[in-house]
Amino acid sequence: MDNTKEYLLEFKGYNFEKSLVKIHIVESVDDFEIRDDDVFIVTYPKSGTIWTQQILSLIYFEGHRNRTEDIKTIDRAPFFEYNIHNLDFIKMPSPRLFASHLPYYLVPKGLKNKKAKILYIYRNPKDVLVSFFHFSNWVARLKPSDTFENFMEMFLDGQVMGSRWFDHIRGWYEHRHDFNIQFMSYEDMKKDLRSAVLKICRFLEKELSEEVVDTVVKQASFQNMKTNPQANYHDIIKYEIGMRSDKGHFLRKGTTGDWKHHFTMEQNERFDQIFQREMKDVPLKFIWDINEE
Ligand code: A3P
């Protein structure tokens, strides 16, 4: 029996994770007052959200960099529509950082005055799919899949939190001129994190000393985040959201090209065909394997 509806809430053609979404936020999203110095990290799930939340928290908060303040990344740059700690966004001091998986047509309309900034992080969708497959089997509130093939069907059909990957990225890309938005790829961050941090700083108009940039890069490394309870969300999944097994990790592998260990040749060909068809007018650069250049 298809029990997808147990896990997803559809609103205006977009699928939210049902038990975590704050539907009152989503329903009144149009009028949510945006401040000029707000920053939104926008991603499709499993594309490097937590990583960018950590990078921005490190850039903006000295107490995060030197770890003198015990505030989790998720409270520095909370999810907008999944406000799991019920933070009062209206009372949050500026500059506010948010993370969101919303599609372009569901974000507050104040973002269209192009003052507040949006950082759109994308990742090659084969690695997104793999990461999402493992994540869905680990986190209790997502629908598990017994086979990779089954998950792939759901992903391609958009029957997952975040709906269709293709629609999300295309939508944001095609409407990029309506927003003050910077696109960056997970793989570029992976290849050269320092350059990526500097690019983010330029976009955010933040001038940091060399030394501070070094600290940001160090603390945003996979190894550092994996062992840093402020940054790795492990306890949030374990104690607040629920996990199916003790074996999973939010910071699972953090690599590029893991899809090669999951896709069969047929699945890969099928995916490539869909990708060509859906993305032919989207000239964003995709890196499928970090050694490919
Ligand atoms: P994997 O499952 O492939 O390991 P999101 O935060 O959007 O849910 O994305 C999670 C993915 O980003 C996971 O991918 C996770 O390991 C990866 N990730 C998180 N922090 C990272 C880092 N510092 N460096 C590289 N990858 C990172």
Image: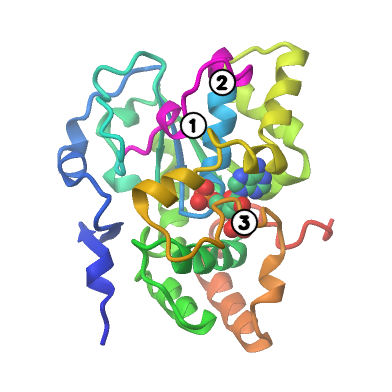
Residue at the spot 40% in from the left edge and 76% down from the top edge: 154
Label 1 lies in ligand 1 vicinity (Cβ under 8 Å): no
Judge whether residue 283 can be spotted in this image. Answer: no
Q: Secondary structure at mark 3?
A: loop
Mark 1 vs mark 2, CA separation in Å: 8 Å
Percent across and percent down for residue 28 are 15, 38
Residue of label 2: 64
CB at mark 3 closer than 8 A to ligand 1? yes
Q: Which residues are magenta?
A: 60-80
1 and 3 marks in contact (CB < 8 Å): no
- Residue 235 - label: none
* Image quadrant containing the N terminus: bottom left
Residue contact between numbered discs 1 and 2, judged by CB atoms under 8 Å: yes
Task: Report the quarter where the C terminus lies.
Answer: bottom right
What separation in Å lies between label 1 and label 3 (alpha carbons)? 18 Å
Residue at mark 2 to residue at mark 3: CA–CA distance: 23 Å
Q: Position of residue 60 (x, y in %)?
A: 54, 18
Residue on which disc 3 sits: 252
- Whether residue 143 is situated above or below residue 101 in the rendered picture: below
The number of numbered badges drawn on the structure is 3
Determine the residue positioned at 41% across, 29% down: 75
- Amino acid beneath label 3: Arg
The residue to which callout 1 is attached is 73
